[in-house]
Image (tube, helix red, strand yellow):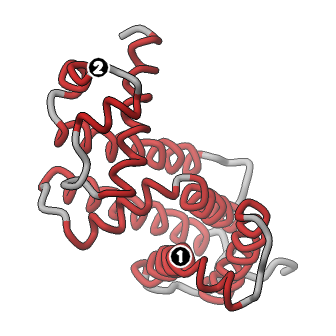
Amino acid sequence: MNTNMISKEENILFAAEKLFAEKGFEGTSTREIAKDAHVNISMISYYFGSKEKLYEKLVEYRMNEGQFFSKDLLGRTDINEWQKIEKVIDQFSNKIRTQKCFYRIMQREQLHTKNPQIVEFLKQTKMGFLSMYSQILESGLKNGIFTKNPPIYLLHSTVSGTLFYAFNAKEMYKEFLNETEDEETFDEKYYTELNKHIKYLLKDLLGYEENK
């Protein structure tokens, strides 16, 4: 597969991602995707075979990015377990902030998907996160970095639940705070505070003290 082919595929994937986020899977046609990607409609069949397969490929593409990050992080020896937790939060939060379209799609999928392939992708991704938290927690307890051993599913729920709720409620909070800044400026402040808040919660949950 040459570079041009990859960039063409990605170009179609990203055009589809915006449309799926806006109109949903059913509400998006391959004709619209082709138009927004500036390609002939036959290119979608050529690269992906069908709209379903294109959709599955998009989910796989985004999910794989997270899996590479997890494997790399677990293998690092230059940072301790608390610093690994901080990196997980920063990475997860940054993805939700910068890949808004994809996370809108994913939230819809959690509720409505009938595609068994996507159900499996979602399950495997969550299981991957649980496994990563388990390994970091186990190692942190063994090394004396953490003093508490909370249930892993609660740790995962605290991070994911807080991030997703904040992602969905951002516009309401902006109005509540009477913020008139542009989106980029508000996002910067909002996600910085959010990250700080989640880390504060996890310090308590894990019994981590910075200056022990």
Task: Estimate the x, y position of residue 179 in percent, counting from the top left.
Answer: 77, 80
The answer to whether the residues at label 1 and label 2 have Cβ atoms under 8 Å apart is no
Residue at disc 1, secondary structure: helix
Q: Is residue 63 above or below residue 169?
A: above
Residue at disc 2, secondary structure: loop
Residue at screen point 40% across, 34% down: 36
Quadrant location of residue 96?
A: bottom right
Task: Estimate the x, y position of residue 25 in percent, counting from the top left.
Answer: 24, 53
The image quadrant where one finds the N terminus is top left
Q: Earlier in the sequence, mark 1 or mark 2?
A: 2
Residue at screen point 56% across, 55% down: 95
Residue at label 1? Answer: 159
Residue nearest the viewer, comparing 211 with 65: 65
Residue nearest the viewer, comparing 7 with 202: 7
Mark in the foreground, 1 or 2: 2
Residue at label 2? Answer: 40
Q: Is residue 2 left or right of residue 99?
A: left
Residue at screen point 82% across, 77% down: 210
Q: Is residue 135 left or right of residue 27?
A: right
Residue nearest the viewer, comparing 94 with 51: 51
Label 2: how many Cα within 10 Å (few below 14, some 14–19, many 20+): few
- Mark 1–mark 2 Cα distance, whole angstroms, equals 42 Å
Quadrant location of residue 172?
A: bottom right
Q: Is residue 140 above or below residue 207?
A: above
